[in-house]
Amino acid sequence: MKIIVVGAGEVGFYIASHLAHENKDVVVIDNDDTALRRVSDNIDVQVLKGSGSSPVVLAKAGVESSEIFLAVTNSDETNIVSCLVADIISPSTKKLARIREADYDEYHENFRKYAPHIDTVINPEIEVVKTIERLMGVPGAADVGEFAEGRIKFIGVYLDNNAGLSGVRLSDIPEKTGGKRPLIAAIVRDEELIIPRGNDLLMAGDLVYFISEADKLSDTLAVFDKHAEPLRRVIIVGGGRIGFRLAALLDSKPIKSRIIEINSKRCIELAEKLNRVVVLCGDGSDQGILSEENIQDTDFVITLTNDEEINILTSLLAKRMGARKTIAKISKFSYFPLMKAIGIEQVVSPRLSAINTILQHIRKGKVLSSISIKGEQAEVMEALALETSDIVGRPLKDISFPKGAMIAGIIREKEIIIPSGESIIMPGDRVIIFARRKAVPGIEKILAVKLEYF
Amino acid sequence: MRWRYILNISGVLTLFFGLTMIFPLFVGLYYQDQSVNPVLKAMGITVLAGLICHIFFKSAKTESISQREGMAIVAIGWTAVGLFGALPFYIGSGLSFVDAFFESVSGFTTTGSSILTNIEALSKGLLFWRSFIQWLGGMGIIVLSVAILPFLGLGGMQLYKAEVPSPVPDKLKPRIRDTARVLWKVYALISLAEVILLMVGGMDLFDALCHTFTTMPTGGFSTKNASIAHFRSLYFDTIFIVFMILAGINFSLHYQMIRGKPLAFWRDSECRFFFGAVIVLTIIISFNIYGSVYVKAGEAIRYGAFQVVSIVTTTGYATADYEKWPAMSKLILLLCMFLGASAGSTGGGVKCLRVMLCFKFCYRELFSLIHPHAVTNIKIGGKTVPEDVMRSILGFLALYMGLFALSSVLLAGLGVDFVTSFGAVAACIGNIGPGFGLVGPADNFAQIPYLGKWLLIWCMLLGRLEIFTVIIFLVPEFWRK
């Protein structure tokens, strides 16, 4: 499968690297020599210097023979024009574009229907706001994903030192909790991803990923000693695009929200657009303004400035001053391993969100959604079992599953089945698959319709 | 630097290389000659050594390797391949160890300098091995491994860059593995064409194969004592000239040509330069030797062209003893040794592209003296050459010249005469084959003193891996933690 990526920035780089690891043919186009050098030195892809919106460059990159075209530069305009040109040269290529400006929000559907025919518009900011909303909704969660239109949740929680389950063998959990056994898909311990078996132990400090039905979520969370607390007060630090989107979302909710922005002009703009949310003009990392706003009674402090170091430090400060939970926006992936060590449990990343969205759209077969786990070591995907694929009609134990992958759940109509070796997947079922990165190509193969290989 | 990992991969490469000895084994079995036993022994030792190295240095699988590690793997891999490739000669033909090693490295680096005084006395199996290693070394044993061994896929790029150090990197396919496969396919395809054409001219299969295996990598080993002069055939001379030129052209142009772009050669400015150089030099030399050496104009052109092409492409075949030619012709041929073939070809030398860019750089310096405020870029084929690429080319040239000077002084210090020291080092560092003086086309490298052979082995490796990959080991900074 050939994929063209326009833009060798962070998003382009990580998408290209992810795809190259899955043995796809990737061509990266960018204007900037240094960015291209970074790509060609680190990833096994082809690089091409030039403008992604130039027909000559696109033809040279072989857009005609490519299946997917991704425009992920920093500029919305470049992305749209690139898709337009790609659409003229090769209408059959699937096009995805990153478009961030909120003014375009209403037009995503039009972009799909008319001229550039962009199959999917990715707005990482919308995705990030959604993620924040989910994180606020699930107490104690470090990572939240949704499947089957939100009926199934995929949750990552850190196991506290005093949690009842720490030091317990997985197979012993039902005894401990009185019959309930959460479906644990993976454990991240010391930056290492473990796919657990029955006799593995849970340890304090583990990041445990599990799958749960939405309506039974609070029961499952209680097993991990995470209890729901009402959400009443929120402080947002940073009134940029994401900050504003989040504030606008909270504006209509019965939550006391405040947004702190340093730029007074921007504050006026925000105050004009927001009704119930209080706009505060000042430095979010200033202790004075935080204590003025009763930080010790705040449920969530969300730091969304453009400077990630400030986000991290402000989160730490807020926590120290008594805020219950914090969420920090971080873009640099290289910081992720640090977060737990310095005491930040919840982070969101527009880039990771963009990558997740893009990945789910380029999966072969009928993959409905896909979420990559922090540090991109593994992926959880929801896929439609197609009639002629290898996965249906046989007991699971007879399917040659790639190493490092497991089926975490089967959704049949309204019912959710926790699979065993004897379970048989029927055509039309949705399956939730957990896979290490290396196993992804193998998973794609068994999901794909066989006809594709003739 | 993860040395365990580096040695582990080098072990796999050695193992893989040992398996290629199956081909000379078949040849030996077919002709029922004395080579079967030594080749079998050599194969056993190589495979076993590779296996032991791989198992002993078992290390965790990694997803990527750094540039430094890539260079280390390639340098160690090439040394190992040179050593193990020498085993069939060492066991099978009574050569001293240094002679066998010299012959083997001369093969792999596609140099084609020989220490054998009577080539035809060698058994068929060993003769085949001698040619076959040139073929493997031409497109690169590491490139072949990247193409075939699946687990090298991710780190393959660093290895590829260390073995095929092109001034302007060129990836034919998005993935390095596919690029390596395409290159080997094109290489094999052109080789097949040459075998067929040689056989049409009446050469037997064995000689056709052996000579193809040394033309395509611009190697220069022949199965005959008199090299190509042995055949005394205009047809063969022409075929060899054509295929030497093909081998001296960037293989990505061959790929474009096969993909249906017939003007690819002409559109590439380096290729035009290469053709131009060959034609102009042939004309000058033919004029120079017409009358003084050859009476007929046709003969002057035939022998002039063959020698020029053979030296410029760094092949090293001979149909005439150019040492008996006038001084001007000899000097031009000596300079040709430095020029070399195109970047991305199997030829050695400095490479046309670097020479061209160096001329352009000099011109720009002069231009900016006249127009001190002018903003000028060095362009090739309409594209600007980045400043750092230019810098690395100048660094390469300085190192090439410096190492050439140093090595020839050292060789002279070992008691070799003036012209020979100069010629032998130029021929080895440029991967050509025959040099001047005692190592001219009619002689061989047998008389070079013991230490001198080691020095030349080092020169050949330097030339083949384009200096940096080999010399980096001598930089103290490389070893610092």
Image (tube, grey):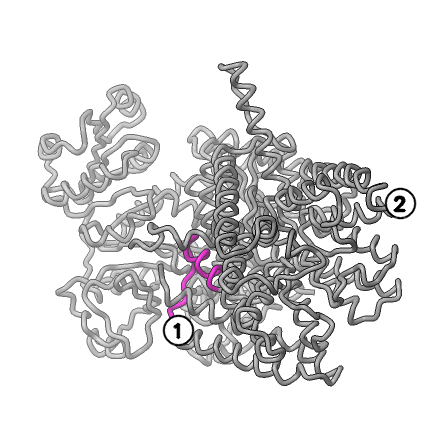
Q: Which residues are magenta?
A: B57-76
Q: Secondary structure at mark 2?
A: loop
How many marks on residues?
Answer: 2
- Pick the front one: A381 or A107: A381
Q: Is residue B6 left or right of residue B209?
A: left
**Does label 2 or label 1 sit earlier along the sequence?**
1
SS under mark 1: loop
Parent chain of label 2: B
Q: Is residue A425 magenta?
A: no
Residue type, mark 2 in image: Val
Report how far apart the C-alphas of labels 2 and 1 lie in the structure: 66 Å
Q: Is residue B63 magenta?
A: yes
Query: Left or right of B287: which side holds B133?
Result: left
Mark 1 residue type: Lys
Say the numbered circle drawn on residue A385: none
User: Label 1 marks which chain's residue?
Assistant: B
Residue linked to disc 1: B58
Q: Are marks 2 and 1 in contact (CB under 8 Å)?
A: no
Residue B43 position (above or below residue A429): below
Q: What quarter of the picture does the C terminus of chain A occupy?
A: bottom right
Identity of the residue drawn at 69% across and 59% down: B220
Q: What residue is rendered at 84% in x and 62% in y? A: B231
From the top left corner, tell me how far across and down residue A205 is, in percent: 20, 62
Q: Write down the residue under mark 2.
A: B295
Residue B112 visible to the viewer: yes
Q: From what the image shows, is residue B78 above or below residue B428?
A: below
Give the number of the mark in front: 2 or 1.
2
